[in-house]
Amino acid sequence: MSTISVTEDVKEALLKVASELQIKWGRRVDLNEAIRYLLTYRIKRADLLEKACNPIKDFEEGYSELMSERKRDEERAFRKFGV
């Protein structure tokens, strides 16, 4: 057995996963099993990530509209608050 160091937030997340697995499996689950589960069954699908990162159709038009509205908001705020 080896010892690893994790931050408190990671430890809490691992405990949460372990408790969810305990409920699902109906038996006690240690952190080693929780880590093994995460490494085995929650592997990210690269094809879905690639699909999610593809540019949206008509992105440029929407982005330019967003930027012009943001500029107008800032101009209104400057006129109102002088900041």
Image (cartoon, rainbow, N blue to C red):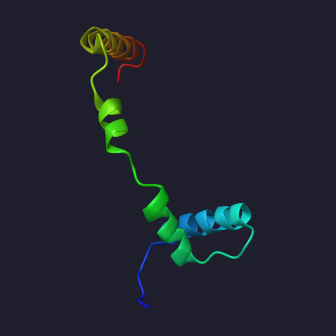
User: In this view of the protein, which residue sits in the foreground, 44 or 14?
Assistant: 44
Q: Residue at x 69, y 68 (%)?
A: 22
Q: How many marks?
A: 0
Where does residue 17 sit, x and y in percent of width and height?
59, 63
Is 26 rendered above or below residue 5?
above
Residue 55 lies, in percent from the top left, at: 27, 23
Residue positioned 29% across, 35% down in the render: 50
Choose top left, top right, bottom left or bottom right for residue 68.
top left
Viewer-proximal residue, 61 or 43?
43
Quarter that holds the N terminus: bottom left
Residue drawn at (72%, 73%) of the image: 27
User: Could you tell me which residue is drawn at 27 percent across and 8 percent down?
Assistant: 61
Where residue 18 sits: x, y (%)? 62, 68
Which of these two is toward me, 59 or 45? 45
Question: In screen coordinates, is 16 left or right of 26?
Answer: left
Answer above or below: position of 39 versus 31.
above
Above/below status of 73 relative to 49: above
Q: Residue 83: image x %, image y %? A: 35, 24
Q: Say if 7 sits above or below 54 in the image.
A: below
**Quadrant in which residue 45 is drawn:** top left
Q: Quadrant of residue 13?
A: bottom right
